[in-house]
Image (cartoon, rainbow, N blue to C red):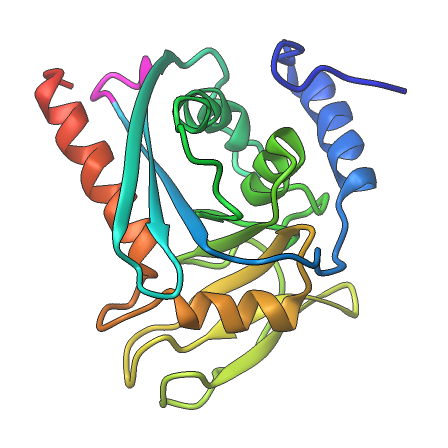
Amino acid sequence: MTMDLYNDQPQDLAGARVVQEYIAARVSLADRPGRLKRVAGVDLHFSPDGSRAIAAAVVLSFPELAILEQATASTPVDFPYIPGYLSFREVPAMAGALAKLKQRPHLLLCDGQGIAHPRRAGLACHLGILCGLPSIGVAKSRLIGRNRQPGKKRGAWAPLFHQDQVIGAVLRTRDGVRPLFVSPGHMISLPTAIQLTLACTGGYRQPEPLRAAHRLAKTTAAGLGV
């Protein structure tokens, strides 16, 4: 079975489930060898009426985390808000922003879930498969699973379990702040996802690529009056 993830947008929940099953079957949790010199963060802002999505992609150097390039894209939102299927509202604009970049990143950080998803096909998996890039889901809240709390120091983490499988890590990125929920998206293992999320995080809770993408998406949306 082949599927055009750019153009074959599902029309209903059953179709969306088929797409997610297709994505999950193709996710790789093996680290892809190669140099890491550029990491991109992607984030998105919706118009007040929810009719448009404004996405930002920001490329930073690694390990310096200096901004190299940025791009935005805006698309109509055609899929309803349904937990577990949010990538169908977000991916078209995010993929559009990534396609405008002149420098191809070596890693994507996504503000959402990777395999920490009921069908192991969260936003980071969807974008990773679509773009053919290693990707990590870095979410601010838990979608599924159970976990204990990690230690209070930066770098402490606890496994996130679902159906007796480790699907991610509850990671403390700064001393004493609420942890983030990190899970592999594509072409990356959980230990490497934890390591790189920490390496991309400075003095704030969120990694710098995601903070930069969030700022750009918000200011772009404000400039468009949405």
Magenta-highlighted stretch: main secondary structure?
loop
Quadrant of the snapshot with the C terminus: top left
Residue drawn at x 46%, y 23% is 99
Image quadrant where residue 64 sits: bottom left
Location of residue 81 in the rendering, given as x and y in whole percent from the top left corner = 46, 26
Residue 177 in the magenta stretch? The answer is: no
Location of residue 127 in the rendering, given as x and y in whole percent from the top left corner = 57, 35
Q: In the rendered image, is residue 176 in sight? A: yes
* Foreground pick, 105 / 19: 105
Location of residue 165 in the rendering, given as x and y in whole percent from the top left corner = 77, 67
Location of residue 152 in the rendering, given as x and y in whole percent from the top left corner = 36, 89
5 vs 217: above or below: above
The part of the chain drawn in magenta is 47-54
Residue drawn at x 65%, y 13% is 10
Quadrant of the snapshot with the N terminus: top right
135 vs 16: above or below: below
Residue drawn at x 48%, y 43% is 105
Q: In the rendered image, is residue 148 in sight? A: no
* Foreground pick, 202 / 147: 202
Image quadrant where residue 23 sits: top right
